[in-house]
């Protein structure tokens, strides 16, 4: 069994996942509503994301655009990224934090060589935990 985060966006899913891929690497597979078999049911959403998956090894981050009447700002969770290398964790943290809000600066803790909490510019909350 695998458990993977699935994020919803208010129409900017494509931009968010291209941003995530530029930082995390991996393979990006994306389908718009216009590319789906249900394209005719969403004439105003043809260019919005029906489903996206960013895969890096065993990690997969998935998402889609949510119609405005169903979108809710993320709360009550974090996408937790664990990395062996604290320097790489710092790079990822700093890149994800650009244009976002740092909730806890990335620094050494009693349990890790580096740990930090942020909300990125798309509203996704992240915890970066390194060198545990």
Image (tube, rainbow, N blue to C red):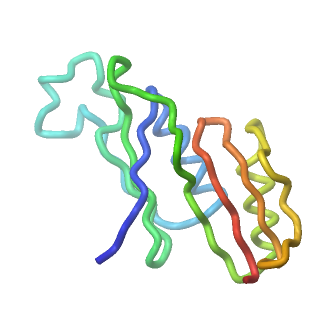
Residue 76 drawn above or below residue 21:
above
- Choose top left, top right, bottom left or bottom right for residue 24: bottom right
Q: Position of residue 95 (x, y in %)?
A: 76, 52
User: What x and y, as percent, mark residue 61?
Assistant: 45, 58
Residue 114 in the figure: left or right of residue 19:
right
Q: Quadrant of residue 88?
A: bottom right
Image position, residue 85 (x, y; %): 76, 80
The image shows residue 107, relative to residue 63, as above or below, that is below
Q: Is residue 19 visible?
A: yes
Residue at 63% of width from left, 53% of height from top? 126
The location of residue 41, given as percent across then percent down, is 13, 23
Q: Is residue 23 above or below residue 131?
A: above
6 or 75, nearer to the observer: 75
Relative to residue 10, is residue 29 depicted above or below?
below
Q: Residue at x 72, y 48 (%)?
A: 118
- Quarter of the image that includes the N terminus: bottom left
Residue 28 visible in the picture: no
Picture quarter containing residue 22?
bottom right
Residue 121 lies left or right of residue 63; in this view the side is right
Q: Residue at x 63, y 73 (%)?
A: 82
Q: Is residue 39 left or right of residue 102?
A: left
């Amino acid at each position: 069994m695998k458990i993977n985060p699935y994020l919803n966006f208010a129409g900017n899913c494509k931009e968010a996942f291209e941003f995530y891929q530029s930082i995390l690497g991996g393979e990006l597979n994306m389908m718009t509503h216009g590319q789906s078999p249900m394209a005719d049911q969403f004439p105003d959403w043809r260019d919005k994301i029906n489903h996206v998956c960013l895969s890096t090894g065993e990690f997969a981050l998935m998402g889609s655009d949510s119609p405005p009447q169903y979108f809710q700002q993320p709360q009550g969770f974090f996408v937790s990224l664990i990395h062996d290398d604290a320097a790489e964790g710092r790079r990822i943290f700093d890149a994800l934090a650009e244009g976002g809000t740092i909730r806890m600066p990335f620094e050494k803790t009693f349990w890790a060589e580096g740990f930090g909490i942020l909300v990125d510019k798309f509203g996704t909350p992240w915890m970066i935990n390194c060198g545990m």
